[in-house]
Each structure stands twice: as structure tokens, then as C-alpha cells.
Image (tube, rainbow, N blue to C red):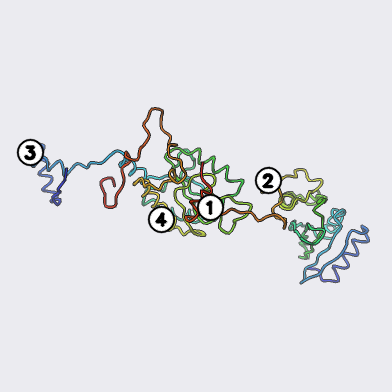
């Protein structure tokens, strides 16, 4: 991991290259996080890739309910020469959950982006095949959002079998 | 007719008796005893059930971690080949038994239902493990219990069940097949009358079904 000083230097370098691209930084328990402007996420990742963070180790979504903007998309970048990791976080709102796809920079982002779309409803603009990957295609709602009901079904045991739940017809 | 069986005599004595029978030397009473000793009577239903129960062909089908335990029942320790169930078929059209070994997602349920519909009667299903029966720790938006989309004969609880538990479930299924136990899925799911019978063929009434009783070894 880069230390807090290197994180700030990286953030400043990015701000110099693309103005207002980095909104904030976080350094917590040795984990360096750049909080990026979702409109400039592609430029940020391209710059980081040029710096040596050539591998997109993971791409995932988070729901920060009740904080606003609620949704977060996290990019875990890895520099394989120095074995350094840095996270890039972009916050998008649930009203307009759109962010640029980084599939041009990292082809491996294809399925992770579809999963984030499936579970959180974030639309990755520029993705060639933006559809659900895990849930059925006619499924409604985004099940990993915090306001989505957990779901599940009452289970049929011997004691409630008379209620005729789950009757096979 | 009550049959009183004499204890079996020595093989050499029986061989001599067979020679006498072929020569026609046995009188009426001895001839009757000779036949009683050598003929086994049963009903066709019982004989068919005996054969079906001892030659279940499971479908080669694994869903999740329970499939690991399912694999173990064909290995050396609990060897289902002892009971005649070792021939895992690769096609549902050749299989008698489907073991749902793991969690069933909403996307997978239609696939399993299709496999079940492709299997030929008579067919049976075992729901293995907590996820498949009651969705276990995954009781959320993603899974569907197997009772919702197909009839299940035997539920094997556990997370995952040990191979011995699945073995016990299969043996319970064998008891059910051989004995025509009345707690079958057709009764449970109000499906009596859905048997696949040819037109004109009489449906199986309960009086026609021979009931297996403990100690009754005529059909086994």
C-alpha cells in the first residue's frame, strides 16, 4: 500500500492532470482510497494505469444508505511491479446511477460491471452488453441495495403443512 | 394355503431326491413337498417393485457443495453399488432418480423442472441438504425451495448431509418403492390420478397395490 503521503501526492498529481477529478482521499487502516468524480473516472483510471497500476483487481459496488450519494463503485487497482494497491471510489446517486464504463481500459471489467448493474442498478455507459448477469433477465429491482427486502419464503415443515403452503398443483 | 417348510436337508439328499423325481419315483405327498421346496410364489407388483427398488439409476447431477457428499456415496466407504444404485446415468431419459444436491437459484429452477419432466416414469426425487429443502442460510431473494416447482419423495436434512445420511435417504426411498408406502408424493401433493397410464388401462386403486409388511419376505 502507498502510505498517506504518497496517497496525497498521487491525488495532487491527478488533480493537476485533470482538474477536480479527485474530490477527497481516505487513509484508513493502511488502505488508501481516492474518491473520484464519477464523470472523470475513466481519466483517473487511465492516469493510474500509466503510473503502473496496470491491473484492475476488483470492481464492485456498495450501498452507503442512508448517506448521499448512496451508491459507490469501487475500483481496486494493483501495481504488480511494486505490489502496491490503491482503491478508487466513485459515488453515484440512486436517482441517476450512471458512470462511464472502463471496459476500454480493462477488458476484465466486463463481467464485474454487469454484476454491479445487476445488484445495484448502476448503468455503465459505453458497456457493449449491459444486462443482468446473475439474476433472471426479467427480475425486477436491484437486490443488493439496502432498501431491497431480503426476501425468502416461509419454509414448509410438518407443523405448518396443513396451511397448504407450497401446494403442488 | 399354509406352507409348512421342513428345514432344508443336505445337498446330497436333495440331489438324490431330484433324481427320484425325474425318474417318477416320488409319490403324491412327496412330490407336493418337493414342489413346495423349490417354487417361490409372489405377485407381479411385488416382483416389479423389488426390481425397481434395487436398481435405481440416479441422474449425474450436482448443484453445489452437497454434490461433494453425493460423489462420496459411490466411493468405497459408503458404496451404493452394494444396493445396485451405482449406475449414474448421464441422460435424464435413462435415470430413475434425481438428487437435488445443493441450492436452487431462481434461474436454475426451470432447468431442473425441465430435467424432471424429461425423466420417464417411474421417477423419484431426493432433496438433499438444507438449501434445497428449506433454503437454509440462503433464505433470501435468490433461492427457491425445491417443493415449489417439483414433487420430492425424500428430504435429507443436513448442511451438508453426510454420505451416510444420503445413503439412508436412498434406502428409505427403496423401502418406499418396494413397499408402496402410502406417504408418497402423489398423496402429499394431491396428485393422485396423474399416473401416466395408457388410455383404457385401469388406474391403480389402493386395493390393487400390494402392501409391504415388516417380516414379509416373499417379494424381497
Left or right of B4, for residue A144: right
Please report, as a chain letter, where disc 2 is located: A
Q: Secondary structure at mark 1?
A: helix
- Please check whether the numbered discs 1 and 2 fall on a single chain: no
Q: Tell me, yes or no, whether the two marked residues, 3 and 2, touch with CB atoms within 8 Å.
A: no
Number of callouts: 4
Please report, as a chain letter, where disc 4 is located: B
Residue B6 percent across, percent down from the top left: 13, 50
Would you place residue B160 above or below residue B87 in this image? Answer: below
Would you place residue A89 above or below residue B32 in this image? Answer: below
Residue tagged 1: B132
Label 3 to label 2, Cα distance in Å?
Answer: 79 Å
Residue B32 percent across, percent down from the top left: 11, 40
- Please tell me which residue is depicted at 29% across the width and 38% down the height of the picture: B44
Q: Tell me, yes or no, whether the two marked residues, 1 and 2, touch with CB atoms within 8 Å.
A: no
- A65 and A33: which is toward the camera: A65
Q: Secondary structure at mark 4?
A: helix
Q: Quadrant of residue B193?
A: top left
User: Of discs 4 and 1, which sits in the foreground?
Assistant: 1
- Please check whether the numbered discs 4 and 1 fall on a single chain: yes
Residue tagged 3: B28
Q: Tell me, yes or no, whether the two marked residues, 4 and 2, touch with CB atoms within 8 Å.
A: no
Q: Tell me, yes or no, whether the two marked residues, 4 and 1, touch with CB atoms within 8 Å.
A: no
Q: Quadrant of residue A90?
A: bottom right
Residue tagged 4: B168
Label 4 to label 1, Cα distance in Å?
Answer: 17 Å
Residue tagged 2: A139
Please report, as a chain letter, where disc 3 is located: B
- Please check whether the numbered discs 4 and 2 fall on a single chain: no
Amino acid at each position: 500500500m502507498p502510505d498517506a503521503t504518497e496517497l496525497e501526492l498521487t491525488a495532487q498529481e491527478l488533480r493537476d492532470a485533470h482538474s477536480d477529478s479527485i474530490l477527497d482521499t481516505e487513509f484508513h487502516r493502511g488502505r488508501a482510497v481516492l474518491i473520484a468524480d464519477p464523470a472523470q473516472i475513466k481519466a483517473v483510471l487511465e492516469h493510474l494505469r500509466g503510473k503502473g497500476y496496470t491491473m484492475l483487481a476488483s470492481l464492485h459496488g456498495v450501498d452507503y444508505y442512508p448517506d448521499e450519494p448512496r451508491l459507490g463503485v469501487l475500483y481496486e487497482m494493483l501495481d504488480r511491479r511494486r505490489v502496491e494497491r490503491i482503491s478508487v471510489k466513485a459515488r453515484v446517486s440512486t436517482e441517476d446511477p450512471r458512470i462511464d464504463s472502463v471496459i476500454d481500459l480493462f477488458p476484465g471489467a466486463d463481467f464485474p460491471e454487469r454484476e454491479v448493474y445487476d445488484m445495484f442498478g448502476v448503468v455503465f455507459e459505453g458497456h457493449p452488453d449491459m444486462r443482468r448477469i446473475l439474476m433472471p433477465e426479467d427480475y425486477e429491482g436491484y437486490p443488493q441495495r439496502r432498501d431491497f427486502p431480503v426476501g425468502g419464503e416461509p419454509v414448509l415443515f410438518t407443523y405448518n403443512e396443513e396451511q397448504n403452503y407450497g401446494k403442488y398443483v | 394355503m399354509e406352507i409348512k417348510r421342513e428345514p432344508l436337508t443336505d445337498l446330497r439328499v436333495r440331489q438324490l431326491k431330484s433324481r427320484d423325481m425325474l425318474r417318477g419315483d416320488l409319490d403324491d405327498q412327496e412330490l407336493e413337498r418337493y414342489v413346495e421346496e423349490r417354487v417361490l410364489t409372489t405377485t407381479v407388483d411385488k416382483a416389479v417393485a423389488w426390481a425397481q427398488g434395487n436398481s435405481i439409476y440416479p441422474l449425474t447431477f450436482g448443484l453445489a457443495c452437497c454434490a461433494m457428499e453425493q460423489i462420496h456415496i459411490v466411493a468405497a466407504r459408503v458404496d451404493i453399488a452394494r444396493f445396485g444404485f451405482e449406475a449414474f446415468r448421464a441422460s435424464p431419459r435413462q435415470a430413475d432418480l434425481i438428487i437435488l444436491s445443493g441450492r436452487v437459484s431462481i434461474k436454475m429452477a426451470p432447468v431442473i423442472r425441465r430435467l424432471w419432466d424429461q425423466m420417464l416414469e417411474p421417477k423419484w426425487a431426493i432433496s438433499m441438504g438444507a438449501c434445497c429443502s428449506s433454503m437454509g442460510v440462503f433464505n433470501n431473494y435468490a433461492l427457491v425451495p425445491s417443493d415449489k416447482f417439483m414433487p420430492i419423495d425424500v428430504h435429507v436434512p443436513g448442511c451438508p448431509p453426510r454420505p451416510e445420511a444420503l445413503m439412508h435417504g436412498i434406502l428409505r426411498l427403496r423401502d418406499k418403492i418396494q413397499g408402496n408406502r402410502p406417504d408418497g408424493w402423489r398423496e402429499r401433493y394431491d396428485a393422485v390420478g396423474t399416473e401416466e397410464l395408457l388410455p383404457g388401462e385401469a388406474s391403480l386403486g389402493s386395493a390393487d397395490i400390494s402392501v409391504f409388511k415388516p417380516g414379509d419376505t416373499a417379494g424381497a
